[in-house]
Image (cartoon, rainbow, N blue to C red):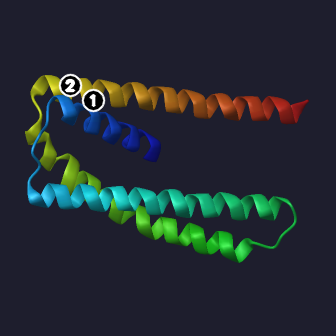
């Protein structure tokens, strides 16, 4: 999901060069916070993946994994509320109906592919384990 958002932000930044939309100071502040949130989430998730990998190699990282999971569990509800209630819905006023429809279609396609890829990996893993 984070990569999707970052991809959309990159697209928006590219589109701004062609068709700039002036954000209110409040929305500009929130998007800056969201970008910082995403950097933090990537860093924390990376630390969690690293701790898991070290655990799989025999290092005792259980407490580290638990701490990082608790942190992400605390972080995400607040972050998602900020995105949904204070940014995405209020910022719809900046876009035409056609632009909103196009973005929604792109998000549906992304979600469809993401779910497909997730379950494809699960099936491959299960098939490999059953051999």
Q: Residue at x 62, y 64 (%)?
A: 47
Residue 100 x/y as whole percent = 18, 30
Identify whether 66 is placed above or below 76. Answer: below
Q: Residue at x 58, y 70 (%)?
A: 68
Identify whether 31 is placed above or below 104. Answer: below
Identify whether 99 is placed above or below 25. Answer: above
Label 1: element kind: helix
Q: Give the crowd class for mark 2: few <14, some 14-19, many >=20 residues within 10 Å.
A: few
- Of the pair 58 and 14, the residue shown nearer to us: 14
Quadrant containing the N terminus in the rendered view: top left
Residue 88 x/y as whole percent = 22, 47
Say whether residue 62 is left or right of residue 16: right
Label 2: element kind: helix
Q: CA distance from mark 2 to mark 1?
A: 5 Å
Q: Give the crowd class for mark 1: few <14, some 14-19, many >=20 residues within 10 Å.
A: few
Say whether residue 114 is left or right of residue 56: left
- Of the pair 74 and 21, the residue shown nearer to us: 21
Res 52 → quadrant: bottom right
- Of the pair 37 and 124, the residue shown nearer to us: 37
Residue 110 x/y as whole percent = 42, 29
Residue 1 visible, this angle: no
Say whether residue 74 is left or right of residue 122: left
Q: Residue furthest front?
A: 17
Residue 85 x/y as whole percent = 21, 55
Is the C-beta separation of discs 2 and 1 under 8 Å?
A: yes
The residue to which callout 2 is attached is: 101
Q: Residue furthest right?
A: 131
Q: Residue at x 77, y 35 (%)?
A: 125
Residue 88 visible, this angle: yes
The residue to which callout 1 is attached is: 104
Report the label total. 2
Q: Residue at x 14, y 46 (%)?
A: 91
């Amino acid at each position: 999901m984070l990569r999707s958002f970052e991809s959309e932000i990159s697209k928006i930044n590219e589109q701004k060069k062609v068709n700039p939309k002036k954000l209110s100071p409040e929305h500009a502040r929130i998007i800056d916070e969201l970008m910082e949130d995403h950097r933090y989430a990537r860093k924390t998730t990376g630390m969690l993946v690293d701790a898991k990998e070290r655990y799989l190699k025999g290092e005792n990282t259980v407490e580290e994994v638990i701490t990082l999971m608790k942190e992400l569990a605390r972080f995400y509800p607040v972050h998602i509320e900020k995105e949904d209630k204070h940014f995405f819905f209020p910022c719809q006023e900046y876009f035409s109906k056609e632009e909103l429809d196009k973005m929604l279609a792109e998000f549906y396609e992304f979600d469809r592919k993401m779910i497909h890829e997730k379950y494809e990996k699960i099936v491959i893993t299960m098939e490999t384990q059953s051999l």
